[in-house]
Amino acid sequence: MINKPEIIEYQNGLRVILQDLPYTGICSVNIKFASGSCWEDESTSGISHFIEHMLFKGTTHRTAFQIAEETDEIGGIANAYTAKENTCLYVSALSEHGPKALDILCDMAVNPLMAEADVTTEKSVIIDEIEMYDDSPEDVCAEANDEAVWEGSPLSLKILGTRESVNRFTAVDLRERHKKFFTPERTVISICGHFNKDEMLNVIDKYYSDSENTGFEITSTEAEFKSKVTTVERDFRQNQIILSFPGIDNYDSRKYAALLLSNMLGASTSSKLFQRLREELGLVYSVDCYNTAIGKTAIFSICAGLSPGDEKEVIEETKKIIADFCNTITEKDLSRAIEQAVSGFVMGLESSSSRASRNSRQILLYGKITSDEEAISAYRSVTLDDIKNAAHSIFDMSKASLCVAGKVKSNKYYYDILGGT
């Protein structure tokens, strides 16, 4: 049996989620902060990601080596990431080491040293990371697409920043940003697995009891989707394309229909796009489809990796499949998509780490946790008419945007394929 999460809110705004899973021998800790690229601008682009790196470079109580050594001593697996809406620290360890694992993470979150010498060293590491992404057709196309469709919004900015912005940051910049954005009211600590509640709360009190609420509330991201054609010339072996439309956000009751729609159209091996473009015509190696919600904004994207000479046929076939989608889908298609979605959802929550992450994200961004039963019921409640309505809402070619990366042709060439969008 899965116990329901317990949510504790401190006077300073810190929220702690405790979900006991007595059957496991693991304790997972996930700390999310409302600090990401959607709260940045050109001058601060990449600063949240930079801070994520610096959290591992030592605290006022531990050196960087001590953080690594103490984590290894308890057999812990620790890491971090930065997204558009949050920065995340996480660790999993055996249950008996839960308090120690939490202590290490809280120390990193609250007391980062951010020495100038470490900042200088880490700039090279982050620029290497930027260059690694620049060698990936998928990443280059995705970043260029975001930059185009969200032009004028923070959502257009790269999570890692640019070489110029990274090189500008000083230790003072990072400390000031950390002081403002890594505050209790913008922090959620999620603990999932088998643990002693009192021991874990004692650790949290040790680090957060003296912290005050600064009144810096979390705002929901909003942006206007822009339709355009974008090309990025690169000497890749394969081209990457993204055809995107305004999507359905997580505040919309149709969000489950949008997720199932993406599965039926291109996110599974039985989907319309995969079967037609790869299995029947052999035009692509990879094809995918997803509805990505960010705050009150969303994008529905169709992605494919292909040879430059096959672009026209792939885009035209994709347009046909979209146009005929509502006439060709069946109850059997929907049933298959629902089973895949429910199966993926349940399997994704098999680990304490996955549950801790889901709980923290939902509380940080939406203020509540959708139970497993509610989510599964929502998937199973979607009808074929719901899918068709979502498709009609999304697939308006006059609102489409296309991004191509690799050995590209003129923008006019792609506009003509789209039909003069």
Image (cartoon, grey):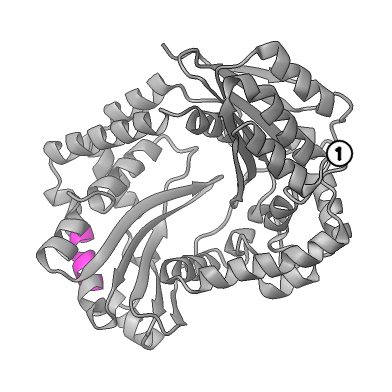
Q: On the rendered structure, is 384 left or right of 199?
A: left
**In the image shown, does 134 or 283 lie closer to the viewer?**
134
Q: Is residue 254 above or below residue 267?
A: above
Q: On the rendered structure, is 346 left or right of 192?
A: left
Residue 182 location, quadrant: top right
Q: Does residue 394 appear in the picture of this structure?
A: yes
Q: On the rendered structure, is 383 left or right of 28?
A: left
In the image, the segment drawn in magenta is 315-323
Q: Is residue 136 above or below residue 337?
A: below
Name the residue rendered at 16%, 41% in the picture.
333
Is 316 included in the stretch rendered in magenta?
yes
Magenta segment main secondary structure: helix
Q: Is residue 363 above or below residue 41?
A: above
**Quadrant containing the C terminus in the rendered view:** bottom left
Name the residue rendered at 61%, 29% in the picture.
367
**In the image shown, does 340 or 226 lie closer to the viewer?**
340
Q: Pinpoint residue 240: horizontal percent, then vertical percent.
A: 36, 72
Name the residue rendered at 77%, 17% in the picture.
202
**Quadrant containing the N terminus in the rendered view:** top left
Q: Pinpoint residue 280: horizontal percent, then vertical percent.
A: 10, 64
Secondary structure of the residue carrying numbered label 1: loop
Residue 104 location, quadrant: top right
**In the image shown, does 292 or 390 lie closer to the viewer?**
292
Residue 324 location, quadrant: bottom left
Q: What type is the residue that disc 1 sits on?
A: His
Is 222 included in the stretch rendered in magenta?
no
Q: Pinpoint residue 172: horizontal percent, then vertical percent.
A: 89, 58
Q: Pinpoint residue 193: horizontal percent, then vertical percent.
A: 54, 21
Q: Which residue is mark 1?
A: 61
